[in-house]
Amino acid sequence: MAPILGTRRLQWLNEAECHRFAQRLAAHPALRTACVELWGPLGAGKTTLTRAVLKAMGVQGKIKSPTYAVLETYSVPGCEISHFDFFRFSDPHEFEDAGFREVFSRAGLKMVEWPQKAAGQLPTPDLRLHIEPMTEDRREVQVEALTPQGLALMATMDEAHVA
């Protein structure tokens, strides 16, 4: 496992704060080639955050959860986006069987929900976000940077929301 280069604890008091975080993240050019892992229980807000990031990047129309399809792809000028949800994987080798290694080798943003279900198959992420629901609206978020690119992305986070 890659060493953690930096961490930050954030608190989102409501969904609007999640959306503001997504807008700041989406505005950073380094996100266009990043791999972001999203950890947390069902209902934590992983898909909500991904939708907010994709909308902030300019994705138009409905952004579907890839829970059943496993992968949904989007395109905005200058960036291909792959949104994965490995929740339904029962074996990490399903990643290889589905040909996802090729998708990860291409340029573009990768947003990955339930990465633990593909354990040992994924490349080192730039950012890892652990989203923990505290109440119906409030979330505590542990952000970990695992690459220099992840550290650059972490620098965009608003100090006012550090827990």
Image (tube, grey):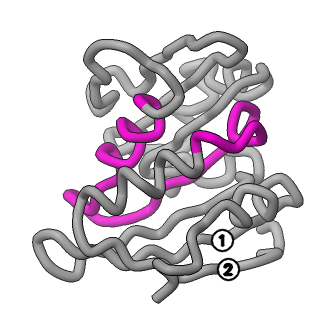
Q: Residue at the spot x=50%, y=15% of the render? A: 74
> Closer to the camera, 65 or 60?
60
Q: Residue at the spot x=59%, y=49% of the render? A: 25
Mark before the other along the chain sequence, 2 or 1: 2
Where is 104 relative to 17, above or below?
above
Report the residue that reaches farthest toward the bottom. Answer: 163
* Element carrying mark 1: strand
- Residue 41 is situated, as x and y percent measured from the top left of the image, at 29, 65
- Residue 47 is situated, as x and y percent measured from the top left of the image, at 32, 44
Which region shows up in magenta? 26-55
Q: Residue at the spot x=55%, y=25% of the render? A: 82
Is 47 a magenta residue?
yes
- Report the disc number at residue 144: 1
What is the CA distance from the residue labelled 2 to the residue labelled 1? 5 Å
Q: Do the residues labelled 2 and 1 touch (CB within 8 Å)?
A: yes
153 relative to 93 in the view: left or right: right
> Which residue is disc 2 drawn over?
7
Q: Can residue 89 be seen in this view?
A: no
- Residue 9 is situated, as x and y percent measured from the top left of the image, at 53, 82
Where is 38 relative to 123, above or below?
below
Report the residue that reaches farthest toward the right. Answer: 148
> Closer to the camera, 158 or 84?
158
The amino acid on which the numbered mark 1 sits, given as a three-letter code, is Glu
Is 158 a magenta residue?
no
Q: Residue at the spot x=44%, y=23% of the render? A: 71
Q: Quadrant of residue 3?
A: bottom right
162 relative to 134 in the view: left or right: right
Report the residue that reaches farthest toward the left. Answer: 136
